[in-house]
Image (tube, helix red, strand yellow):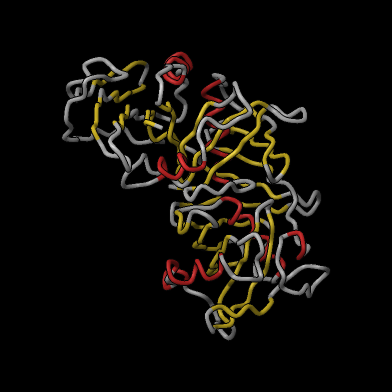
Amino acid sequence: MAANTTSSISVSSSSSSLFPSSRSYLPTLVQSQNRLFLRNNLALNKSIKGSSTFRIMAVSLAPKIQEKASLSSFLDQKENGFLHFVKYHGLGNDFILVDNRDSIEPKVTPEQAVKLCDRNFGVGADGVIFAMPGTNGTDYTMRIFNSDGSEPEMCGNGVRCFARFIAELENLQGRHSFTVHTGAGLIVPEIQDDGQVKVDMGEPILTAADVPTKLPANKDYAVVKSDLVVDGETWIVTCVSMGNPHCVTFGRKGDQNLVVDQINLADVGPKFEHHDVFPARTNTEFVQVFSRSHLKMRVWERGAGATLACGTGACAVVVAAVLEGRAERNCTVDLPGGPLDIEWREEDNHIYMTGPAEVAFYGSAPL
């Protein structure tokens, strides 16, 4: 459940605002049927690599709150040069969600996404996600721009946030599932009764050329427990695609058990990401084994850097752990932002990911 919090922020006045009483910061608490809202009438002058006004409405929400009228009226506001959005996070992996259901063209360019994701001069996020009309018979299409402006095929934490966003937009109550077209193919998220989101992530791709990686296949066309020299050190890696490429390592050659908290991600992560054996770059997961059903990982994401969670990465980690004989097919994977439950079912070869997705706030920002 998202915590109900009150923030105190010093702000300067603005000549206009989306909200009443724009010249002052006036939190209004409204309690109705055990639901508590924090509505911040906030006008905040902030430079976003230029003289623009950044404005936010912060709303603290419990997961079962469904305020379709409020959300729709907020997102439907038309103001030239401003983007209205809702920010969500999945275990701290945070995204700016945009209602793009009226167009197949993103409302934000990659360059604008970079500015919006900037944590010092923008909203701050790991990516911008667009909820678009369905493709090829699906209910919806999901596209995402990373914080560096690149477009990944898919994002596991992002698709859970996407599902919760759609549920609020459509005022869906209780358990619901729908089909989503992504760059990685068909994804089917299902909102559970407890508010968590279970996602059928499809089948892992193991063929080396399709990951893609230039490392030579050594097990049924796959790369499993192969040597990879990175900056003079030999790492043992397994390569998996979840529609996006992953390089999973349980340690350097000769290591007994990697202690992931000792990894300097900022140093080694980019060297994996841009290694010449990964023609499309790669996400990299560093994994510590606690038991055959309990793993811990840290991730360096392609296009986003070190993040608190990566859903496709957690799926890739369980696949790699099974292939290397380190774990069973049903595991809890600890990420810096919290745990995900991952199951790689033998009967259909699909991977199922279950975890939370929560609202952070509603906001608007200049484009």
Please tell me how many numbered marks the rendered image carries. 0
Query: Residue 197: x percent and y percent?
Result: 57, 38
Residue 65 located left or right of residue 16: right
Query: Residue 148: x percent and y percent?
Result: 48, 51
Is 345 drawn above or below residue 105 in the view shown?
below
Query: Residue 84: x percent and y percent?
Result: 42, 26
Q: Quadrant of the C terminus?
A: top left
Nearer to me, 18 or 285: 18
Is 334 drawn above or below residue 56 in the view shown?
below
Residue at (40% x, 26% y) in the render: 82
Residue at (23% x, 35% y) in the render: 7
Residue 113 located left or right of residue 215: left
Residue 217 located left or right of residue 45: right
Q: Quadrant of the N terminus?
A: top left
Nearer to me, 194 or 319: 319
Nearer to me, 247 or 351: 247
* Direction front: furthest residue: 50
Query: Residue 111: x percent and y percent?
Result: 47, 43
Residue at (57% x, 50% y) in the render: 311
Residue 135 located left or right of residue 64: right
Nearer to me, 8 or 279: 279
Q: Quadrant of residue 361?
A: top left
Q: Quadrant of residue 60?
A: top left
Is 322 drawn above or below residue 136 in the view shown?
below
* Direction right: furthest residue: 220
